[in-house]
Amino acid sequence: MFLTQLEVKAQTEFVLEPSQSMIMTGKGPGQDATINPYFGEDCFAIIKNIGKRMFSIRVQQDGKIIEEISILKGELKKVKLLKGYELYLDPNLKEIAKASVDYEKTEE
């Protein structure tokens, strides 16, 4: 008998309206825009800019900004999220942005 373990992944695509900051994960069920199968533990967020405009990725904890990263058109970023971190996507003030968000388990 041959057994394999499949990794659970969740991917979602979003359209972000101008000046619409959106929480992807970190607040919990009912508040997050995505379902992070690794909520409550360290993981990676994989964010891809699938639109035509740059936007920003913001990681914060307890209201304190940990990191802000610009992501250009067509670019892919892998961001480590520690337990308790919140992930936000922030488009610019005048243009629509599009993003794809996925999660990966960290290697232990």
Image (tube, grey):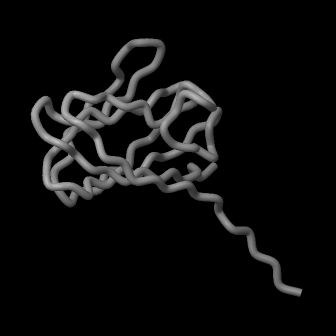
Work out whether residue 28 or residue 2 is closer to the camera in this orientation and state it.
28
Q: Residue furthest left?
A: 94
Where's residue 93, x and y in %? 13, 29
Where's residue 75, x and y in %? 22, 57
Please tell me whether residue 80 is drawn above or below residue 3 in the rendered image: above
Q: Residue furthest bottom?
A: 1
Q: Residue furthest right?
A: 1
Horizontal arrangement in the rendering, residue 89 relative to residue 71 (left or right): right
Horizontal arrangement in the rendering, residue 107 relative to residue 22 (left or right): right
Please tell me whether residue 84 is drawn above or below residue 78 in the rendered image: above
Give the quarter of the figure containing the N terminus: bottom right
Where's residue 57, x and y in %? 30, 36
Please tell me whether residue 24 is drawn above or below residue 49 in the rendered image: above
Q: Quadrant of residue 42?
A: top right
Work out whether residue 49 or residue 81 is closer to the camera in this orientation and state it.
49
Q: How many marks?
A: 0
Q: Quadrant of residue 87?
A: top left
Q: Name which residue lies at 31% across and 46% down.
A: 15
Q: Quadrant of residue 38?
A: top right
Q: Name which residue lies at 41% across and 12% down.
A: 63
Where's residue 55, x and y in %? 20, 40
